[in-house]
Image (cartoon, rainbow, N blue to C red):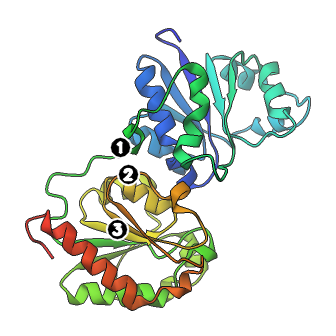
Amino acid sequence: MAAGGRVLVIRGGAVGDFILTLPALRLLRETLPDNHVEVLGYPGITALAVAAGVADSTRALEHGGMARLFARGGDIAPDLAAYLAGFNLVLSYLYDPDGIFRDNLARAGVKTLIECPHQVLPGQGHAALQLARPLERLAMFLEDGDWRRPFFPRRAGAGEVSSVVLHPGSGSVRKNWPLDRWLEVAARLEARGCRVIHVTGEVEEARGQLAGIPADAEVWHQRPLPELAERFGGYTAFLGHDSGISHLAAACGLPCLLLFGPTDPQIWAPPQPGVRVLRAQTGNLTELSAAEVAAQAVCWLEEIASNNNGIL
């Protein structure tokens, strides 16, 4: 595509799904450095693409008039049609089994559309590779290992004070380890002189987990994702599950120890270096004891310390 072109990437989905799409966005950015890249999605999430430098701007997927694009023969507002037609290339990750959205984009004046997978399938490789594969139609290929690079640089001196960020939740209850066991692990780490910060959000609040965290614990509650990315850059390590926040921590280059149960880490674990997975072999996370996870965490942190001036 010629310099000065415009590319629109339409991507809904949860935090983790979006972060797994960042390698595709970076591939677009690095292959088409003189093109404007915009992401149409959920603002609180898509802001990460701008913060990571792989998109120039974002727009809300739920802004006025968009709903008509999902109705067959919907009345498309002239300003929306002009907006969509202003892009040389549109990539859509939206679920469109009947081609209604595709047909309406064509009616709006979109000339080049690449339909991307709305879900990740087993047996097709890592999720990030699957999500970037449609770009191969444009002769854009993720290089070996390149897609594993972090997106947010860590600050100089990160981890000089032993500190672990712990996120005790995820969007699925089946992917969550019991909170009381996380708190036991946190207590064991704190007994070793490690500072533990708890990250929580709306999901944890709705499930009543905030009440279980000690009143004197340091908690980052409902912080914007770009702010978390900035904060993560100054800490030693991260503990969590298969969750969007874990993907964010890994994308910041933070060493991660992640508990996996029903999901396959070969597909869903963050691809960045420094990610270690502890998996419940039956898929049921409750089979992992607090003592086992704490022991693994201590050994893992000691390995990090051996490369970090002996801290911990």
Q: Distance between the residues labelled 1 and 2?
A: 6 Å
Give the residue at mark 2: 272
Mark positioned earlier in the residue sequence (3 or 2):
3
Q: In this view, does 241 lie to the left or right of 11?
A: left
For the residues bearing labels 1 and 2, Cβ distance under 8 angstroms = yes
Give the residue at mark 1: 149
Count the numbered circles shown.
3
User: In this rendering, is residue 275 above or below 78?
Assistant: below
Q: How far apart are marks 1 and 3 (CA)?
A: 17 Å
Q: In this view, does 88 lie to the left or right of 144?
A: right
Mark positioned earlier in the residue sequence (1 or 2):
1
Residue sitting at x 69%, y 23%: 113
Amino acid type, callout 2: Gln
Residue sitting at x 19%, y 59%: 158
Label 3 sits on a secondary structure element that is strand
User: In this rendering, is residue 262 above or below 12?
Assistant: below
Q: Where is residue 110 in the image (x, y as percent from the top left)?
A: 72, 19
Q: Position of residue 1 (x, y in %)?
A: 53, 12
Name which quarter of the figure residue 233 lies in.
bottom left
Residue furthest left in the image? 309
Give the residue at mark 3: 238
Q: Say whether residue 76 is visible.
A: no
Q: Position of residue 291 (x, y in %)?
A: 37, 91
